[in-house]
Image (spheres, rainbow, N blue to C red):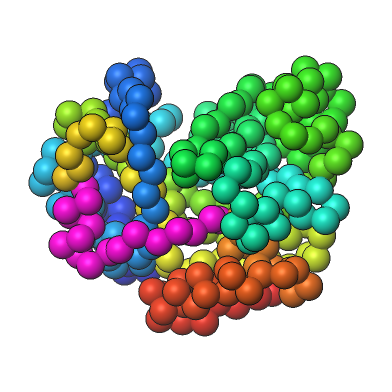
């Protein structure tokens, strides 16, 4: 039986008007600025209520406004991509596969951050069966070699991440909000698992030339920007041997937000 917070969250989501994938194609954020925020489910309910009143709409996929995602992050034996982030390297990459559970669509994705803090993503469709291993897919391996610094032989799966996502769009189509809840992680190399309980990670993607109403809503609820990476937090929590001092501060921030200690299994 769902908890009270889950029931309130689902009601708040249902109160938001819908937007289709086809309509979402009209959201062209050419001068995009990304900002992440951290809250809990109770805080999210108040944000969603204000978003509904302000005319925001929620993306509907296969009849649902809360969609399930599964992502597998790849890295080198020495965790080069994780360490680049930990060591504050400005230009860095992440490689992952991602399945949109409701639609079944699966992609190989390469995310690259430049020295101006902007992130660009390149991706290609792969069969769902290749979520954990695309090494036998010649086109996927060629795509990886062309778009990243790595070859498939250098990489192997490190982490499985699972979450539910709500995607909101403002009436002017100048900003998009992704809201991730029920975040769960499994580390393939250590066998450890954890989840972020009722923590919520919000990412605001806005046109840099337009005013953001959502920033005002988040500020009204005292939800402040925070730099947080799901991959880096998950690796910090599930691998006791990795160098992760910088990210342990983020872990404590999450625990303060949810009012509980995170449990590692």
Q: In this view, does 171 lie to the left or right of 207?
A: left
Q: Can residue 146 be seen by looking at this rendering?
A: yes
- Between 181 and 155, the residue placed more toward the observer is 155
Percent of width and height locating residue 101: 56, 37
> What is the quadrant of residue 235 in the picture?
bottom right
Q: In which quarter of the image is residue 201?
A: bottom left
The answer to whether residue 221 is magenta is: yes
- Determine the residue positioned at 64% across, 41% down: 93
Extreme residue toward the left, this view:
53
Instruction: Using the image, determine if residue 71 lies above or below residue 25.
Output: below
Q: Nearer the viewer, residue 255 or 155?
A: 155
Q: On the picture, is 88 further left or further right than 241?
A: left
Give x and y (percent) for residue 244: 66, 70
Q: Position of residue 237 (x, y in %)?
A: 64, 70
Find residue 193 and report its image quarter: bottom right
Queried whether the magenta region covers residue 116, the answer comes back as: no
In the picture, which quadrant includes the N terminus? bottom left
* Magenta stretch bounds: 214-230
- Total of numbered circles in the picture? 0
**Which residue is located at x 55 percent, y 31 percent?**
121
Choose between 169 and 209: the one closer to the eye. 209
- Can residue 6 be seen? no
Q: Which of 75 and 246 is in front in this view?
A: 246
- Give the quadrant of the C terminus: bottom right
As displayed, is residue 230 above or below residue 103? below
**Which residue is painted at 73% across and 60% down in the image?**
187
Q: Residue at x 85, y 53 (%)?
A: 77
Residue 260 pos. (x, y %) = 46, 81
């Amino acid at each position: 039986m769902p908890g009270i917070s889950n029931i309130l969250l689902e009601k708040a989501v249902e109160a938001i008007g819908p937007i289709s994938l086809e309509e979402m194609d009209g959201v062209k954020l050419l001068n995009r600025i990304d900002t992440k925020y951290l809250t809990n489910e109770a805080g999210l309910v108040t944000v969603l209520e204000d978003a509904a009143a302000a005319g925001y709409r929620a993306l509907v996929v296969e009849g649902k406004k809360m969609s399930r995602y599964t992502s597998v992050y790849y890295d080198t034996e020495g965790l080069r991509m994780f360490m680049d982030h930990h060591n504050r390297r400005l230009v860095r990459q992440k490689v992952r596969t991602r399945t949109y559970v409701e639609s079944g669509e699966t992609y190989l994705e390469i995310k690259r951050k430049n020295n101006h803090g902007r992130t660009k993503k390149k991706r290609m469709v792969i069969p769902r069966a290749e979520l954990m291993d695309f090494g036998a897919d010649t086109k996927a391996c060629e795509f990886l070699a062309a778009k990243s610094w790595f070859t498939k032989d250098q990489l192997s799966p490190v982490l499985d991440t699972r979450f539910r996502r709500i995607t909101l769009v403002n009436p002017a189509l100048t900003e998009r909000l992704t809201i991730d809840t029920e975040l769960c992680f499994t580390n393939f190399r250590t066998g450890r698992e954890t989840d972020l309980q009722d923590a919520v990670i919000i990412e605001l993607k806005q046109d840099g030339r337009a005013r953001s109403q959502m920033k005002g809503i988040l500020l009204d609820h005292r939800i402040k920007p925070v730099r947080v990476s799901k991959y880096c937090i998950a690796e910090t929590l599930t691998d006791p041997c990795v160098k992760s001092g910088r990210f342990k501060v983020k872990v404590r921030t999450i625990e303060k937000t949810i009012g509980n200690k995170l449990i590692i299994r």
